[in-house]
Amino acid sequence: MLRALEAAREAAEDGEIPVGAVVLDASGEIIGTGRNERERTADPTGHAEIVAMRRAAAALGGWRLSGCTLVVTLEPCTMCAGASVQARLDRVVYGAVDPKAGAVGSLWDVVRDRRLNHRPEVIAEVMAEECAAPLIEFFARRRVG
Ligand SMILES: [Zn+2]
């Protein structure tokens, strides 16, 4: 989570919403890091989780991220929650809760829908306050400036 937070801070420095993510392999090694880069890449799918999953899949040489864990500073949206199911991730760990758009327990619970045959384990609110802090700061600054 510390590495994900570092990526979130890097995003904020570039004027992106500060969200960071990493993918760990079964041994706990980081195989993909991502941060929100929607503005820089003009890509609506440029969320931290998607970027991290793409890099992890490239590192492994395949789209299946079985055995892997996604760690992200903010509760994933519907797109990213869906992608984590598609990637067959074992686990999703997130920091801050997103009551406005969260799809891993808040507005929806995409990854634990019993109708799906793959459901990643969820560990929520890990370092939640630390993960929320850069977001609160970012939006406070945006309102002022
Ligand atoms: Zn997302």
Image (cartoon, rainbow, N blue to C red):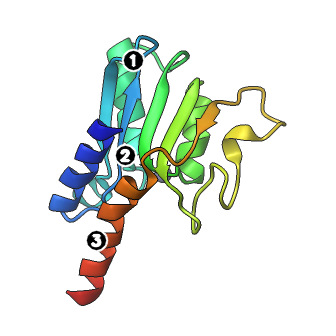
Residues tagged 2 and 3 counted as in contact (Cβ below 8 A): no
In the rendered view of the protein, which quadrant contains the N terminus?
top left
| The label number, if any, that marks residue 137 in the structure image | 3
SS at circle 1: loop
Q: Secondary structure at mark 2?
A: helix
Q: Is there any visible trace of residue 17 in the rendered image?
A: no
Residue 116 picture location, percent across and down: 78, 33
User: What amino acid type is highlighted by mark number 3?
Assistant: Glu
Q: Is mark 3 within 8 Å of ligand 1?
A: no
**Is residue 87 left or right of 59 when viewed as pictured?**
right
Give amino acid for label 1: Gly
Residue at (55% x, 54% y) in the render: 77
The residue positioned 84% from the left and 36% from the top of the image is 115
Callout 2 amino acid: Ala
How far across and how far down the image is residue 49, in percent? 42, 42
**Mark 1 neighbour density, 10 Å: few (under 14) some (14–19) many (20 or more):** few
Q: Position of residue 87 (x, y in %)?
A: 55, 27
Q: Residues within 10 Å of mark 3 (few under 14, many from 20)?
A: few
Name the one closer to the observer, 52 or 2: 2
- The residue that disc 1 covers is 28
Image quadrant where one finds the C terminus: bottom left
Q: Nearer the viewer, mark 1 or mark 2?
A: 1
Local SS, label 3: helix
The 10 Å Cα crowd at callout 2, few under 14, some 14 to 19, many 20 or more, is many
Give whichever of discs 1 and 2 has the lower sequence position. 1
Q: Is residue 42 visible?
A: yes
Q: Which residue is disc 2 drawn over? A: 48
How many numbered marks does the figure carry? 3
For residue 7, which quarter of the picture? top left
Decide which of tag 3 and tag 1 comes sooner along the chain. 1
Name the residue at the left extreme: 13
